[in-house]
Image: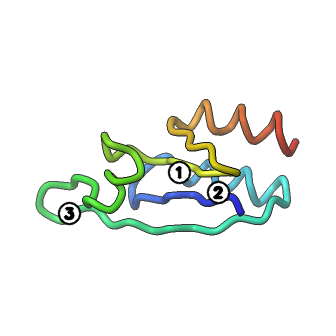
Amino acid sequence: MLIVHHLNNSRSQRVLWLLEELGVPYEIKRYARDPKTMLAPPELRAVQPLGKSPVITDEGETLAESGAIIEYLVNKYG
């Protein structure tokens, strides 16, 4: 199952939109920013060391950066 690691106030919304348009089943793991520092929580840093979002995991692969993710999704599912 494809998993989207979604951090509030990030570019992961465009990845979710594309997955909906392609009709690809996915799961969302939601993360909230620290309200004072606006940094990603440690749970997201365990997936992506810089705490950046979006991140997807798909069949053992982990990808970050929305442009790379979109290219991957279009090539695989589009």
User: Are the residues flagged by discs 2 and 1 in contact, CB closer than 8 Å?
Assistant: yes
The residue shown at (32%, 51%) is 45
Q: What is the quadrant of residue 3 in the picture?
A: bottom right
Residue assigned mark 2: 16
Task: Looking at the image, tell me whether mark 1 or mark 3 is earlier in sequence order.
Answer: 1
Residue type for callout 3: Asp
Q: Closer to the camera, 4 or 17?
A: 4
Q: What is the quadrant of residue 27 in the picture?
A: bottom right
Residue assigned mark 1: 12
The residue shown at (11%, 61%) is 36
Task: Looking at the image, tell me whether mark 3 or mark 2 is earlier in sequence order.
Answer: 2
User: Are the residues flagged by discs 1 and 3 in contact, CB closer than 8 Å?
Assistant: no
Residue assigned mark 3: 34
Label 1 sits on a secondary structure element that is helix
Quadrant of the snapshot with the C terminus: top right
**4 horizontally vs 33: left or right:** right
Residue type for callout 2: Leu
